Amino acid sequence: MKKVLSRIAAVFIPGLLILPVACVDSKTPESQKEIASLYTSLETKDCQTLQVDEEIGNATLSCPGTAGYGLYLLDDNMRQSITIITPNRHEFPLNYWHVITPYFSYLGKKAEWRVTLTNGTSKPIALIIQVNAQVQKDVDAKPETKSYLAVAKITQKEICVTDRIPLTATAIEKARTAAETATKKTCLEQLPQ
């Protein structure tokens, strides 16, 4: 079990950290809501182990979320992904291994929830998670790490990955911009094999 879970280690940010990205004054129209980031941990010690298969190296952990949402962190054959759990317990697999990378992968240290803030209440509209791929196109070559920010939209009817952003110095700004319009986007299709 330790062998499987050691790949899931991350850094915990105590509680939820709210970082507003816009100021709203009393003259701001109702239709314009403040958008902020909330962070939750993907660290093993902050998640509950639900299932471990030592023989094939698979694990499922339940990790904290926000506003009634939760996350399942899936580790399947040295590839990691996330399933979003809604407040009414519906499960939406994000299938990073199909839409972000088919290679061995591990997730970043935290989940960034993009939320709208209205009268002190937050409502998730998107989720941003770093996915690190171990790209090895030749069995004799050393794997190369390529990282992406996976942006998933969160709506009443649909939750899925909408953007795959290569990690660069400006990637987080691009991901947050993409998250603000993610609810209007279509889901990413499976990567070619």
Image (cartoon, rainbow, N blue to C red):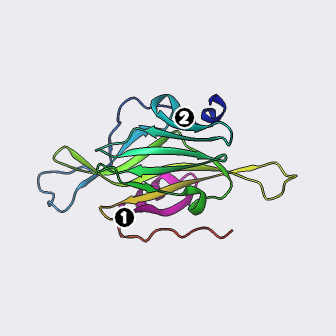
**In this rendering, would 144 be left or right of 13?**
right
Is residue 80 rendered to the left or right of residue 36?
right
Q: Mark 2 points at which residue?
A: 10
Residue name at image x 45 percent, y 30 percent? 46
Residue that badge 1 annotates: 158
Classed neighbour count for the residue bearing mark 1: other residues with Cα under 10 Å, few (<14), some (14–19), many (≥20): few
Amino acid type, callout 2: Ala
165, above or below 17, in the image: below
**Which residue is drawn at the image coordinates 74% and 50% (left, top)?**
144
| Span highlighted in magenta in the image | 159-180
Residue 86 appears in the picture as rendered = yes
* Image quadrant where one finds the N terminus: top right
Q: Where is residue 27 in the image (x, y as percent from the top left)?
A: 12, 56
Q: Closer to the camera, 176 or 95?
A: 95
From the image, which quarter does the C terminus lie in? bottom right
Q: Is residue 34 above or below residue 10?
A: below
Q: Is 161 part of what is drawn in magenta? A: yes
Q: Is mark 2 on a helix, strand or loop?
A: loop
